[in-house]
Amino acid sequence: MTMDSWTKQLTKMYGIYTIGFFSVVIILGILEALGLEAKYIGYTYLFGTIALYATIGILSRTQVLSEYYVAGRRVPAVFNGMATAADWMSAASFISMAGALYIQGYEGLAFIMGWTGGYVLLAVLIAPFIRKFGQYTIPDFLDARYGGKLPRFIGVISAVIVSTAYLVAQVTGVGIITSRFLGLEYNVGVFVGLAGILVCSFLGGMRAVTWTQVAQYIILITAYLIPAISMSYKQTGVPIPQLMYGQALNSIEKRKAELIDDPKEVEVREIYTQRAESLKQKLAGLPDSWSAGKAELEQKLNSLPADDPERATVEKALKSYPTSPEDAKEKWTAQMKAALAASKPPKSYVQTPTDAKGLANFLILTFILMVGTAGLPHVLMRFYTTPTVKEARSSAAWALLFIFLLYFTAPSYAAFARNEILTNIVGLAYTNLPAWATKWAGVGLININDINGDGIIQFAEISIQADAVVLATPEIAGLPYVFAGLIAAGGLAAALSTADGLLITISNAISHDLYYKMINPNVSPSMRVKIGKALLLIVALIAAYIATFKLAIIVELVGWAFSLAAATFFPEIVFGIWDKRMNKAGAVAGMIIGLVVTLFYLIGSRFYGLDWFGIKTISSGIFGLIANVVVALVVSRLTPPPDEKLQDFIDHLRYPKGAVKAGAEE
Amino acid sequence: MIDKQTLEGYWRETRKNMIIILVIWFVAAYVTAFFGAELNKITIGGFPLAYYFGAQGALIIFVILNFYNSRYQNNLDKKYGVAEEE
């Protein structure tokens, strides 16, 4: 079949699929109006979409090596763009990003620019050349370009570290979404999600993952756009959120100015200041303050008679009391910081950071997110799968367009939600809370407490979790449950598609790069696929097992992945293409120093108070990146240049002619 | 095999294109943020300009840059006869 008719056939298939998907949503909407319970709509979305992904997985099952690793290099640009977008946008992008913008205002835009701007680096510096290289993994490239097992091995180590934390976060996301929307037990949700992930990647490798990701993109973008459009219509009368939230920004700034000197707000802030102060004293008095506090509670419990209703409260307080002075330090510091933040008057939502340190951190974080994006192995891998070099270029553009659709909508979610809270919630009596606020307060995503006891809601009394913005918007906009449930289906699609891509990256790094290329090169192609599949299963189970612990650090670790990718992969891949003088010694030294410096600052600044120039933990990669680039350049210039064979290889990477053709490897 | 001279010319133009794109990329993202305080004094459709760039303007420029890069490089392939065989 020619590429053109193949693309046409795909377009037709996904067109029918999209119409089918819309029809299901409309039918569910009608059934809801006729009285179908929300619970069943939720189940239909969950099991319906997983069954769909399973069907695509079964239809795309394969034992062929090039299909398993690179989808036969038969994925046209637009479709690879959608698959890359779904691969890229994780549970965090879908559920939490808008909330982070709500909380951080302008500073949150580092993520919006960082996670899109990286695709310019990818498209210009890397993607077409990776396709021309035409192998299977990123360590393959490091090996071929720098010669020898060592560069490959460092690549494998980095790929596994970077991808694993990220994978656990996705599986955790699946558990949270299913438990929140369907009332499934969190651990059950994790394993239901696991089934959804494995049914694609296990049966059909990259091929099944690709075609599922395209389907997942269509679901997630639809789910994301509809509530924003409705919200825009509700607040402004025009259903184009991306154009209209300028009005919301205006109103946010006006309300903020009014609230700065509002006496009730000031009163609440002062209470927070006192709380922060008393926590500070307790922290300074550690470890004695910890044992004193514990003894006080125990004494109180003992002094109360057995039938006193207050006993339950004290018992609860004892149960949640820090288990050790170290635990107390961690918990009280967090509480102190939260109280301190709440004690400050609201800052501008749209101003850029005013102090030099804040601005530097913003710029550096944006930069590290961009470079990290262009260095993440699961994203880079997708550019092996296009039919030609030309399509790899255009695919990077399509991918960015599809990602852009979500990322330029996210700030509108945040602005509309903040405007809603500032204008319609603040000033209400506690007895008049709207239903959506009561609902999400019930599960702890929104905290509203009458701190000063006046019965009226002050802005300083409201704190929200990042996830609340996207989850609550359909209800704020007055949409029926069929759309709120769609958000769950979208979030699930985002988490599953990213998890699929990561899982394949990790298992390929181990089965292809470590086992086949370094330990046993004589293994047959079909055996390689089998080993890949076995590893997929093992890695997935390990990830799910870790996810069941719900460690708080997981979300942070995802941020770390960008620093690590920026400081280990990115420079050596770019040098590999653009700098003919770069050699093995330089690349190896650069990657090792980049990894070590980044890990040192990540761990040092997070746990041991290390502080270089006031750079935050999440931007640690900047030090590793600079160290990597400098060391690689210096070492390569002090050692002999790559031999003629490698020089020819670099020349060969630089132009499209003679690339491996689609389906040529069977 | 492509002869050295053709490849050198092709790579020189490719590199020039890369630099132009990355300069625009840098200005769109970083220069606008750096001068945010001044830019925010201008408002368009309710959006303070620096906020607009961070939330939307820079992104639109990124998308255009990628499509432009794809077109430019494809034409360059043809000009130097290094395009893939159909």
Image (tube, rainbow, N blue to C red):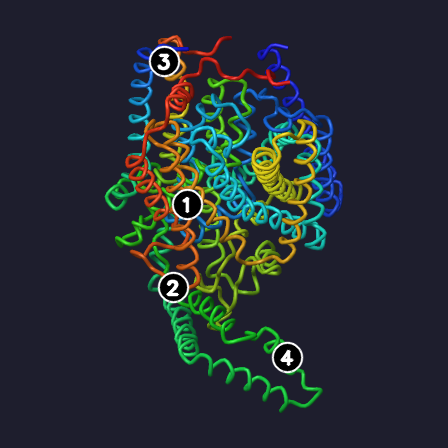
- Which residue was labeled with disc 3? B76
Single out the mark in the foreground, 3 or 4. Answer: 3
Residue at mark 3 to residue at mark 2: CA–CA distance: 52 Å
- Which residue was labeled with disc 2? A609
Position of residue B52 relative to residue A644, above or below, is below
Position of residue A428 relative to residue A132, above or below, is below
| Chain ID, mark 4 | A
| Label placed on residue A592 | 1
Q: Name the residue located 27 percent from the left edge and 43 percent from the top edge.
A: B34
Q: Are marks 2 and 1 in contact (CB under 8 Å)?
A: no
Q: Answer yes or no: is residue A129 visible.
A: yes
Q: Are marks 3 and 4 in contact (CB under 8 Å)?
A: no
Q: Are marks 3 and 2 in contact (CB under 8 Å)?
A: no
- Alpha-carbon neighbours of circle 2 within 10 Å: few (<14), some, or many (≥20)? few
| Chain ID, mark 2 | A
The first of marks 2 and 1 along the sequence is 1
Residue at mark 1 to residue at mark 4: CA–CA distance: 51 Å
Q: Which structural element holds mark 3?
A: helix
Residue at mark 2 to residue at mark 1: CA–CA distance: 24 Å
* Image quarter of the C terminus of chain A: top right
Residue at mark 3 to residue at mark 4: CA–CA distance: 74 Å
- Which residue was labeled with disc 4? A315
